[in-house]
Image (tube, rainbow, N blue to C red):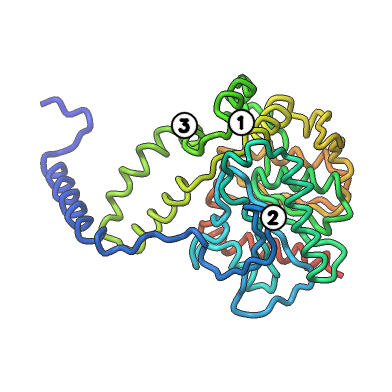
Amino acid sequence: MFNPLNISAEELLRESRKLEEKLAAGLKTLPQLAEATVHYGATRKEEVWRDGKVVLYRFVGEKKPTRKTPLLIVYALVNRPYMVDLQADRSLVRGLLERGQDVYLLDWGYPDRSDRFLEIGDYLHRFIDGAVEHLKSAHGVDAPNILGICQGGAFSLCYAALRPWQVRNLITMVTPVDFHTPDNMLGNWCRELDVDLFVDTLGNVPAELMNASYLMLKPFRLNLQKYVGLIDILDDGQALQDFLRMEKWIFDSPNLAGEAFRQFIKDFYQKNALVKGGLKIDGEAVDLGLVSMPVLNIYAEQDHLVPPAASKALKDLVGTRDYTELSFRGGHIGIYVSSRAQREVPAAIDQWLAQRSR
């Protein structure tokens, strides 16, 4: 009998019965689950400043902050920022609060047609700068600390280069800097995109299109393998809830303002202007050599969206002598939610900031 997988009839029967049991358990478990509600994250927060759809939140921990300088988190535009506070036991925010940090988050909201012509300069000089001015006034400090994540890290670098007096310490996490590294698949795709035709046709960029693009970076794993693996946890209510919570975050994505998208693709992905120079925002030249404050650059070793080389290029571009790199053994999402991340990342950030506090 032809048996290329070398599986006996008994083994096949056991696996079939196990599958039946898992599916039967799922029919009981799924109806009992509450909706995976994560829109507002796990930690209580208060709105302290607003400009249109953009909101600045202050997180409220179980104890009062002990750090005098507030920490502002600037997230990417392409996903919702509650990934940093996904659930109680998977929360970068909670880890920072427990160590005494006073944590704030910029929430970009959901752009609509009225935001079609927002540019990167609006995000930097209107929204980030507005939040920074609020924090300076509210806390009586010269400048806050900034934690920029992914695309938000690229925005934070530009802001720090253009307004270095507005940033006390800068932390970048899984942040792309060199968009032309050979292993950057997304960068290779974007280099051939006719972004003018794309934006002129669509206006704002649909979230569904962006999600499909990210999923196709690892099509087998992200479109098939994880759902096959879902069968193994159908009898585990907590694991199933965690899975659904992550799925909800993945597909809860905003549309992207058309002009900001056009500029980001052209200047960052196609021209690689952060590395090669020539980047201008609102007519001002962006020179990373003017980033003079201390910088902590955190990258993930198995990151398929921002390869380590794309992030580590920052070392040779910034003007500061106080530059630190921290590698994390994990991926682009694991750096926020894995159990290792909960132990390592908040502690490293807090310790680095404490060494530079006055």
Q: Quick check: 273 left or right of 86?
A: right
Disc 2 crowd, CA 10 A, few/some/many (<14, 14-19, 20+): few
Residue at 65% x, 40% y: name it.
308
Residue at 41% x, 38% y: name it.
221
Q: What is the C-alpha distance between the residues marked 2 and 1?
A: 34 Å
- Residue 51, numbered label: 2
Residue 355: x and y in percent read: 81, 66
Q: Determine the residue located farthest toward the bottom in the rendered image.
A: 63
Residue 119: x and y in percent read: 71, 38
Residue at 73% x, 49% y: name it.
297
Q: Quick check: 216 left or right of 264?
A: left
Residue 347: x and y in percent read: 66, 65
49 above or below 293? below
Answer with mark 3 or mark 1, whichever residue precedes in sequence. Answer: 1
Answer with mark 2 or mark 3, whichever residue precedes in sequence. Answer: 2
Q: Which residue is mark 3?
A: 216
48 above or below 204? below
Residue 354 figure quarter: bottom right
Residue 288 figure quarter: top right
* Quadrant that contains the C terminus: bottom right
- Residue 169, numbered label: none
Q: Nearer the viewer, residue 188 or 232?
A: 188
Q: Nearer the viewer, residue 136 or 296?
A: 136
Residue 45 figure quarter: bottom right
For badge 3, the amino acid type reads Met
Residue at 79% x, 73% y: name it.
68
Answer with mark 2 or mark 1, whichever residue precedes in sequence. Answer: 2
Q: What is the C-alpha distance between the residues marked 3 and 1?
A: 13 Å
Q: Which residue is mark 1?
A: 184
